[in-house]
Image (tube, rainbow, N blue to C red):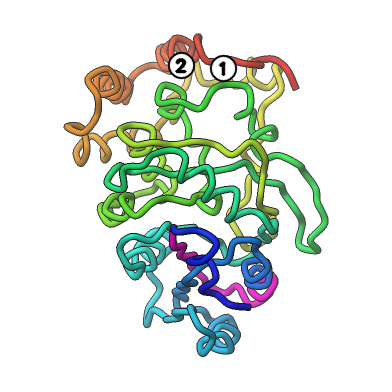
Amino acid sequence: MNINSASIQNPNRIAVVMATCNGAAFIEQQLHSILQQTLQPDLIIIRDDASEDTTFEILTRYANQRGFNISQNPQRLGVNENFAKAVADVPDGYLIAFCDQDDYWLAEKLEKSVQLLTNLTTDPTQPAMVYSDLMLMNEAGELIHTSVHHQRGQHRYEHVWDTFLYGNMVSGCTIVMNSAMKSIMAALPAQQDFIYDAWLAMAAFGFGKIAQLPQPLIHYRQHAHNVTFADHRALTRMERWINHWQNSWKNNTYLQEEIQLAKAFQLMYANRLPIEKKKKLEKFILLNNAHYLKKKWHFEMSFRNYWTNRFGG
């Protein structure tokens, strides 16, 4: 396998960035899926976050292969900072594909992502990224759900600025972005509760370019030791009514994480937003201490023009 063949197949050089931590059980399957891509990356940059199992020993077997850049943090940094350091290691001008340690990529994942990304903008200074849905598999690699977006109800509405404010629908491991997004990743605030994918997606929806691929291209492995989507399924209509009733009279945490993200983003990038998006962001942040029913009313107003299949399957 010639890891530099991407420069011949496509003028856009590609770097895969992977953050690992105690991933020995599945890391080789993921690497195999990367090395079987129809469009091969030029670089595979892997930062291990002080694993306590044999992850780093496995990775060192690849250290002498052309295109691999493998390093280990002396102490645990966490997902956000580890990925930020991996992205910082990517030379300017490369497209960047994020990669988790325990998933499995379909063979055309990079090819289709790069094709869509390069069609988004011809301006290399404009931040741009693409993302996709995910399929869920169990520890044994057996498919258990064909769409995370369907599982979470995120297929029922358009993915735009107005709907993104109320919940991130972009999974980090599906992101492929251009080099102009590197500075946004570098500006990711430390010690926040939100994950890097929401930060990047907010910038792309806010003042960059973003598009979703029409099909899922990753098998996301759901197991006991990773962050899963098990607790984020779409509620039934009865469950939604019960949830509304409970939240209408008690202190609610609805939108707490989303507003925290919005506040941090406003401090950093408010001046880069178009006027209308800036106003919507400001109104959203003002919901911080609002009653649950007021938050839900604003949700309804924001989504009213973007439902495509609200009560469907």
Q: Amino acid at mark 2?
A: Phe
> Which element carries disc 1, helix, strand or loop?
helix
Q: Residue at x 40, y 73 (%)?
A: 76
- The image quadrant where one finds the N terminus is bottom right
Q: Amino acid at mark 1?
A: His
* Label of residue 244 in the image: 1
* Label of residue 299 in the image: 2
In front here: 28 or 223? 28
In front here: 69 or 165? 69
Q: Residue at x 48, y 70 (%)?
A: 42
- The image quadrant where one finds the C terminus is top right
Q: Residue at x 39, y 58 (%)?
A: 80
In front here: 95 or 225? 95
Q: Residue at x 51, y 66 (%)?
A: 8
Whether residue 252 appears in this view of the structure is no
Q: How many callouts does the rendering have?
A: 2
The magenta stretch is: 12-29
Whether residue 144 appears in this view of the structure is yes
Magenta stretch containing residue 160, yes or no?
A: no
Tell me residue 238's x, y (percent): 71, 17
Mark 1–mark 2 distance (CA, rounded to whole Å): 13 Å
